[in-house]
Image (cartoon, rainbow, N blue to C red):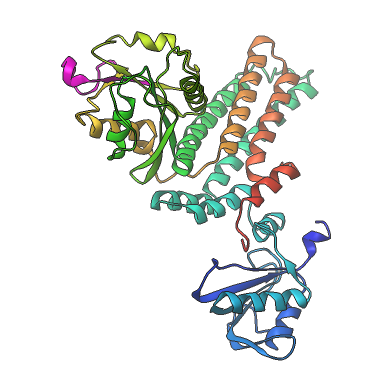
Amino acid sequence: MSERDTDTIAAVITPPGRGGVGIVRLSGSLAFSIAQQVASKVPEPRMAHYGPFIDHDESLIDNGILLCFKAPHSYTGEDVVEFQAHGGPVVLDRLLQRCVASGARLANAGEYTERAFLNDKIDLAQAEAIADLIDAETTAAAKLAARSLQGEFSERIHNLVSALTHLRMYVEAAIDFPEEEIDFLSDGKVAGDVELLIEQVETLLAAANVGRVMRDGMTLVIAGRPNAGKSSLLNALVGNESAIVTDIPGTTRDVVKEQIQLDGMPLHLIDTAGLRDSSDVVEQIGIQRAHDAIAQADRILWVYDGDADPEHRSFEESNLPPHVPVTFLHNKADKTGRKIGLDANKKVFAVSAKQGEGIVELKAYLRQTMGLEQTTQGEFLARRRHIDAIERALEHIRTGKAALHEGLAGELMAEDLRHAQLALSEITGEFSADDLLGEIFAGFCIGK
């Protein structure tokens, strides 16, 4: 730790505003000394003491409860003191300033949790779970964040890293002892272990993608040609007239954003300008913004006029990014007579946005695409950086597998397994760059 990391820090850890109780927390080597100055007493660890909190001029700040936690048995792993006073902002500010004047400094955002991580009280995934638990907007997200905080996600990562480590040892032993009678690389064990690893990482990636949706929600972009019924669909999904609907092509000039919840999970809906060639400068800007939104989408709902374009040929001219999954939405089914819902080939979903027909079924389908119906008790919340790390690990393992099968290249395979191990270790913080840690903990609130 740097000298700054060993400072005694102080912060109000309860939300701003007025309340029945407010708490000021100290953490560091001077915590007990400052408690002695403010409360004239340091109680036994984990024993509550009620008494006066005194300012530097001997005036009374408040009467409250003092709690002490001796290192390493505390949230940060350091000596920790908590002053519980009445929750008025003036009272808490006086108490905080008293602590600072006595030798502490104001804590940075996330510094308590960062110290818990640096002192091996939690790993990086658990630290992020604390922020996710605080920010959770639904019961489901809070439950999954709590599971991550308990270490379920971290345990799965540790198990995979352990398996990678053992496989690396086996491969490197085969490299170091080539004179042995048994060819370790071709005896089938390595190939079998690699296949099992790939399967396990793929399973973890699928769960992480569901966890990411549970945390961030799914961004769904409604796209299509002008007058296909995009704005009508947005209004039907939201349940109010959020977007202007007319028969005039090009009415929507900008992206229109709304949010709904499916089983408590956020679904970010974005209605976009109709995609077509246009000489109108304002409409061109709207079309460019539509393409920008589409590039960031988790899924595209391509809405087409089932009466005017029954084969949705307009999609072929749209030049949409190939990596974003697409659901084709046959609109105006009330005119075409098409059966509401998903077709037999599971490629086209039919609705009548204007009449509101098929909207309930469409929401059920979207729940399925979000992975909500497959959520089990073993799932966890995940962030985009977790998914990126898992994807990189999976790619390295697959590359190592190819090296093994193409030429029994043990050295190349060992290197790929090492990179996979490092990628997964980024998730728990066993291997992390300092700038990554700064970015993660800067997103916490002051006092946590």
* Residue 268 visible to an observer of this rendering: no
Taking depth in this image into account, of 201 and 339 the one nearest to the observer is 339
> Left or right of 349: which side holds 97?
right
Taking depth in this image into account, of 65 and 328 the one nearest to the observer is 328
Question: Picture coordinates of residue 242 (x, y %)?
Answer: 33, 38
Asked if residue 138 is positioned above or below residue 326 in the image, the reply reads below
Taking depth in this image into account, of 104 and 67 the one nearest to the observer is 104
> Which span is picked out in magenta?
327-346
* Residue 67 visible to an observer of this rendering: yes
Q: In which quarter of the image is residue 419?
A: top right
Q: Residue at x 61, y 54 (%)?
A: 444
Q: Which residue is drawn at 65% across and 83% down?
A: 44
Question: Picture coordinates of residue 328 (x, y %)?
Answer: 34, 19
Residue 344 colored magenta?
yes
Question: Picture coordinates of residue 355 (x, y %)?
Answer: 19, 29
Q: In which quarter of the image is residue 4?
A: bottom right
Taking depth in this image into account, of 383 and 18 the one nearest to the observer is 18
Residue 153 colored magenta?
no
Q: In which quarter of the image is the C terminus?
A: bottom right
The outermost residue toward the right is: 3
Asked if residue 292 is positioned above or below residue 141 in the image, the reply reads above
Q: Quadrant of residue 55?
A: bottom right
Q: In which quarter of the image is the N terminus?
A: bottom right
> Left or right of 127: which side holds 288?
left
Asked if residue 30 is positioned above or below residue 54 in the image, the reply reads above
